[in-house]
Image (cartoon, helix red, strand yellow):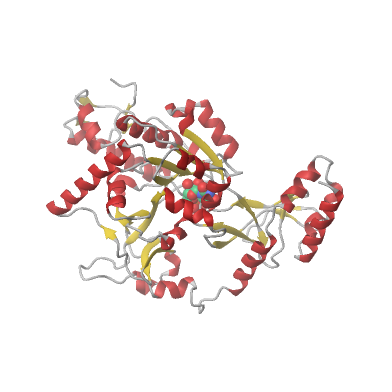
Amino acid sequence: MTQAVVQSLKHRLEKYGQDHVIRFLGDCSADERPLFLQQLAALNFDELARAWQQSRTASDEAQDSPATIAQRAQPPGTLVRLPQTDADLQTWKSAREEGKKILDRGEVGVILVAGGQGTRLQFHKPKGMYPIGPVSNATLFQILAEQVLARSRSHGVTIPYYIMTSDATHAETVAFFEENNNFGLPSDAVRFFQQGTMPALDAATGKLLLADKNQLATSPDGHGGMIRALKETGMLADMQRRGLKYIYYHQVDNPMAIVCDPAFLGFHQQRGSELSTKVVAKRSPTEKVGLLVEVDGKTQIIEYSDLPAEQARLTDATGGLKFWAGNTAIHLFNVDFLARLTETPDVLPFHLAHKPVPYIDDGGVHVEPAQPNAIKLERFIFDALPLAKTALVLEADRSREFNPVKNQTGDDSPDTSRAAMTALHSSWLKNAGVSMATGVAVEISPLWAHDEIHAARRAAELREINEPTYLSESES
Ligand code: UTP
């Protein structure tokens, strides 16, 4: 970086009141300095100033504040619920058949978002490396990658797996896939791409925080950072080059997502949807889960905390909850829609979160705040829903496909996720006539069977299960 460039950077920092970040520049080594200056030069100061302004002016009275949006919310309109009648079963069957044809044509790719820091789980590696298999201890990454492989085999095609990582997870994730030979996926089917980062702002002053004398405090820019990253890393172009039309999107923490679910694909196509999403019925009015609603004719997700308690308790004509549709973060995108989203910079808004962020103070002393001191800026992928011309909402069976690992204990923890996996796999085997000893853990690798129909075919190989059993690819 030339002297002139450094000078112009200093002017920009002064202009935006952020020149405090270079006060320790004299302490940085000759190696550290250019990297730090590059990090600063890459900042979009106008964007940061806008976000800071937004955090100051957010008010509950504003026309589009979360609270007023929640007041106008209605249950989702473009909706397919779980089958209840024979006619529904036929509709689902036809959607499934349609979806299988889409898979046969090799038009489907998969995005896994795995850039989060997993703070609630407190696992000090990328969350995908968490051992979750109830018998095998297979990691979240393994179980999900095996699903992609099983589906590819079943349709005789390559299904590309696009894995989004962040600064926080990239190196370990890539190394882990390498060590495990991509869990059997061909190497040209696995593509890693990195999302961006956003600097943290001091919540009281809007000033950038330093993690160290030569480093800003930053964090991944949210799963919505995927849109910008797809374009910048060339992954969108890769999808287009491969002739993909649909992208199944899922998160790293739900080992039971039905990757490339044919019924989901079929309904998505039949209903002319650009972005579809799966929902599950809320367990209770107060469950802390994002809600799928319609506001002014547009499908969108609102935070549970934005729905007033009395609205959350409302019931409909059938006595069920009016606002019942909980977000699973399982989506299906048209590739053309993704391409359209990437054409508008900042197409997804920032969400601001108050979080404790470690920093160094004016004296260069490292501080670990116990209370939130900073604003983190994140984009959420579900903000793309209202931008779709048609957005379909499809109901899913929670016990079958939504058992995420979010917390260390309690709801949505490793214990609940493992128990759900064991219950599902036992039911597949029992329904196929296998005698199961009570309380014995059983786990099925997607490579042995990735759904109940495949499990029923293979169950003929088994007579009874009396001890903890992992049915894996090598099982005959
Ligand atoms: P969560 O919102 O649950 O965040 O992410 P998290 O980081 O995993 O966990 P907490 O909230 O810190 O405890 C949902 C999904 O979105 C991905 C995560 O990896 C997970 O698959 N994600 C989240 C990203 O890929 N990037 C991000 O910046 C944030």
Q: Quadrant of residue 371?
A: bottom right
Seen as rendered, the residue at the extreme bottom is 61
Pick whichever, 89 or 326, lies toward us.
89
Indicate the position of residue 181 as horizontal and vertical percent values: 48, 25
Pick whichever, 345 or 420, lies toward us.
345
Q: Visible in this render: residue 165?
A: yes
Indicate the position of residue 118 as horizontal and vertical percent values: 52, 47
Indicate the position of residue 187 as horizontal and vertical percent values: 48, 28
Q: Is residue 303 left or right of residue 353?
A: left
**Residue that appears at 44% across and 48% down:** 409
**Residue that appears at 43% across and 36% down:** 160
In the figure, 310 relative to 270: above or below? below
In the figure, 329 relative to 133: above or below? below
Pick whichever, 369 or 397, lies toward us.
397
Total marks shown come to: 0
Quadrant where the image shows the C terminus? top left
**Residue that appears at 34% across and 26% down:** 472
Indicate the position of residue 285 as horizontal and vertical percent values: 34, 65
Q: Visible in this render: residue 120?
A: no
